[in-house]
Image (tube, rainbow, N blue to C red):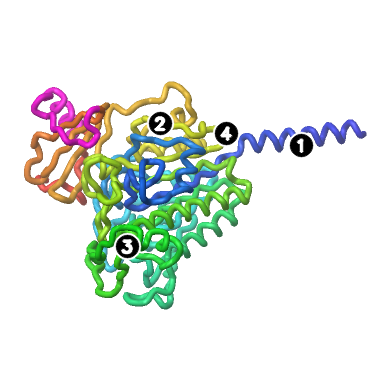
Amino acid sequence: MKKLVSLAIGLISLSALTFGQNKKPNIVFILADDLGYGDLGVYGQKIIKTPNIDCLAKQGKLFTNFYAGTTVCAPSRSSLLTGLHTGHTYIRGNKEIQPEGQEPLPDSVETYAQLLQKAGYVTGAFGKWGLGMVGTSGEPAKKGFDQFFGYNCQRQSHRYYPTHLWENNKKIILQGNDLKHKATYAPELIQQKTFAFIDKNKDKPFFLFVPTVLPHAELQGPDDVFLKMYKGKLTEKPYKGNDYGPDATVPGYASEPDAHATYAAMVSRMDFYVGEILQKLDKLGLTENTIIIFSSDNGSHREGGADPEFFNSSGGLRGNKRDLYEGGIRVPFIVKWPGKIKADSKSQFVGAFWDLMPTFTELTHAAKPRNSDGLSIVNELLGKPKQKQHEYLYWEFHEGGGRQAVKMGNWKAVRLEVDKNPNGIPELYDLAKDPAEKNNLASQNPEIVNKMEKYMGEAHRESILFPFAKN
């Protein structure tokens, strides 16, 4: 009898061990807003302190050639969630809907969050959405998220002390917040809701998406330890006001006089929030079975008095947000998975947001996406051979006269003024020799230019909502 009991206990223990080994990994994806490639210490930042994200990189893998979906928020996030580059994804620009919200993703569009839901994951998003107002086909609940809390509308997210946030389909009024009064700092409230999601779902496989609004304009925040770290120590620069958005410039609403100190404090506060999430996972014993990803939705910004040149926010690359030069689209990308991804490793793999959909579905054994421009980068993450490579990467941008860009190997082509001259000769740069894109080599390499033009033509599928002016 004792032998039978011992055998039964052994089988139960073996079963538990096997289950533990095969348990689906949690995924925590933290997406900064308008954080430049060079804004983190681990990517060369010399002024702003980001110890938690720097530590994350030391514990995982840092990518040096990873790209956002495009150079502004809504289309970049559409590319991220749908696995399609901006020549194919449904949302290709910041198209506003009144009185609140942006052009919604339609019912026909599938996100990776929906596929993870079907694979048994609990899903939550906490921060900024911008892909469909409540009540539309693009609201978070219809695009794969069991729980959402934050700013549904990216226009509203310019304010760190907003009048309201959204919890699923419920409007949460923040008492005491208006154009002059600051009672509730929204990022802190969103952080607490993020913790509650982790606590509630710690015993289930979960996908946690944290699209934080930091350090997006406006330049504002509490006058606390983060601001004190920099105030008086950086060059004084009068605050220009928040000059982005139709209703954003409000006299007296944003009054912090030192824009440099405020921006640095916002980045350090974001880093602190990342550290808090990591500590939460540690405390609950979830770290070993959790894939943690950090990135940014596009390059560094200039809104609200931000000064990317002062901080070298683009890390020596050309351009900022709204450019298709490297500084507008190359972003930090860090992944940690203890015991699976080699600590303190770096990758030169050339990837982009549309790679995450096939990567997530492979990691979670979810159904493959119906359509994707991406490649699974699981082999690259795990240090395995035979990682597939992109033939090329493609971006388009529907403001500033229309722009297109292609990256093929070391070559990068950028076409400007597409609306006026859709067949204009693109600029051409050799990023291996000229990462700052200073020397246009188009006239010296007509065959390469012709190939890049061919890629631009085949990658762009016409959109009724977001046409180039010629159409």
Amino acid type, label 2: Ser
Residue of label 4: 339
Mark 4 and mark 2 lie on one chain; the one further toward the N terminus is 4
Q: Which mark is residue 435?
A: none
Q: Callout 1: helix, strand or loop?
A: helix
Q: Are marks 4 and 1 in contact (CB under 8 Å)?
A: no
Q: Which mark is residue 347?
A: 2
| Residue under the point 47% across and 54% down | 272
- Camera-side residue: 80 or 467? 80
**The stretch drawn in magenta includes residue 436:** yes
| Residue under the point 34% across and 37% down | 66
For the N terminus, the quadrant is top right
Q: From what the image shows, is residue 156 above or below residue 456?
A: below
Q: Residue furthest right?
A: 1
Q: Nearer the viewer, mark 2 or mark 1?
A: 2
Q: Provide the residue span drawn in magenta.
A: 433-457
Q: Is residue 371 visible?
A: no
How far apart are labels 3 and 1 at the CA level? 56 Å
Mark 3 and mark 4 lie on one chain; the one further toward the N terminus is 3
Q: Callout 2: helix, strand or loop?
A: strand
Q: Is residue 146 visible?
A: yes
Residue of label 1: 12
Q: Nearer the viewer, mark 2 or mark 3?
A: 3
Amino acid type, label 1: Ile
Q: Is residue 132 left or right of residue 309?
A: right
The answer to which image quadrant residue 319 occupies is top left
Q: Callout 3: helix, strand or loop?
A: loop
